[in-house]
């Protein structure tokens, strides 16, 4: 197995190293790839208050009475998501999607949730069916890009992101995905350039993950002071220093990336 020394001057990292390095974002409470979750009121958890076990159990009982009932099923999904019960949420969505294969709004949501749960191989055919139906929006194409990024198919991923960007010019979340795709592939200068453009978009103000990903791209090139300045726009000092310490330690040790590489 090949090992890698500290890339203090290099601007291009092995793709697998970069994939592990991207986990720094998780420490900042951000994601390396964005999938918008607000598709409609029916499928949104944005307005859901704090879920209780009692309310969730009641929602589950209503769904169990008619497991093909879309409204009851999605109410149960929202409760499970609020409680962080991802596996059970996906089981309910699996069944709902099976009952409603022609409901493209549900299928699109289901595919995006598969991507979010790391099940890219299952997500791709679901989302491609939505595309074939002619009812795909930019979020569907962006989700397809993320699914291909998860599988290491970076060029194909960026083709879907570019399609999404044509429908939604200047959307920071899509540009963020393109930048992170280049980072995961190991092309740090290109990742930095695109993430800077994403951060310059007006709608990036609501998306601190864009700046944290930019800080990551800069930090991976050894420019730690600059990375600190960027990260400090959104994170408290102690979190910034913890992230930088993590990054420096990772870059200074051989094969650290192997320990950080996501499973699957």
Image (cartoon, rainbow, N blue to C red):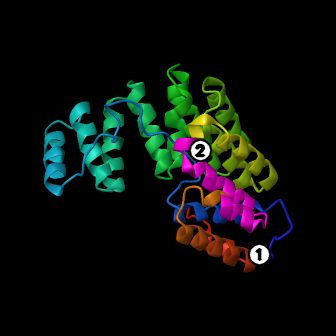
Task: Name the image quarter holding the N terminus.
Answer: bottom right
Taking the spot 85% from the left edge, 65% from the top edge, the residue there is 10
- Label 1 belongs to which residue? 1
Label 1 element class = loop
Left or right side of 57 for 150? right
Q: Image quarter for residue 244? A: bottom right
Crowding near pointer 2: few (<14 within 10 Å), some, many (20+)?
A: many
**Residue depicted at x 59% and y 56%:** 233
- SS at mark 2 in the image: helix
Q: Which residues are magenta?
A: 205-229
Q: Is residue 40 left or right of residue 194?
A: left
The mark lying in front, picked from 1 and 2, is: 2
Query: Which residue shows up at 17% across the image and 56% down it?
Result: 53
Question: Where is 1 relative to 11, above or below?
Answer: below
Question: Residue 146 got which mark?
Answer: 2
Which residue is depicted at the point 67% across and 50% down? 180
Return the residue nearer the eye: 1 or 259.
259
Q: Position of residue 178 (x, y in %)?
A: 68, 42
Q: Earlier in the sequence, mark 1 or mark 2?
A: 1
Q: Which is more toward the observer, 18 or 168?
A: 168
Is residue 47 at all visible to an observer of this figure?
yes
Residue 74 percent across, percent down from the top left: 28, 38
């Amino acid at each position: 197995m090949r090992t890698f020394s500290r890339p203090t001057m290099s601007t291009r990292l092995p793709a697998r190293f970069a994939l592990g390095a991207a986990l720094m974002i998780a420490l900042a409470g951000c994601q390396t790839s964005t999938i918008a979750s607000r598709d409609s009121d029916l499928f949104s958890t944005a307005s859901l208050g704090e879920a209780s076990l009692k309310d969730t159990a009641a929602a589950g009982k209503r769904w169990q009475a008619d497991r093909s009932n879309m409204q009851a099923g999605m109410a149960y999904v929202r409760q499970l998501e609020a409680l962080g019960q991802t596996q059970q949420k996906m089981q309910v969505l699996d069944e709902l999607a099976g009952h409603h294969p022609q409901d493209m709004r549900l299928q699109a949501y289901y595919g995006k949730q598969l991507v979010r749960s790391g099940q890219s191989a299952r997500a791709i055919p679901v989302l491609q069916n939505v595309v074939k139906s002619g009812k795909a929006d930019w979020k569907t194409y962006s989700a397809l890009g993320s699914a291909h990024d998860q599988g290491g198919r970076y060029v194909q991923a960026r083709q879907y992101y570019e399609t999404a960007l044509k429908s939604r010019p200047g959307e920071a979340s899509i540009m963020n995905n393109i930048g992170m795709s280049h980072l995961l592939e190991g092309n740090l200068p290109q990742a930095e350039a695109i993430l800077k453009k994403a951060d310059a978009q007006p709608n990036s103000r609501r998306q601190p993950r864009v700046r944290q990903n930019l800080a990551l791209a800069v930090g991976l090139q050894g420019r730690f002071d600059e990375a600190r300045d960027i990260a400090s726009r959104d994170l408290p000092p102690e979190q910034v220093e913890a992230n930088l310490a993590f990054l420096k330690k990772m870059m200074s040790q051989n094969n650290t990336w192997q320990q950080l590489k996501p499973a699957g």
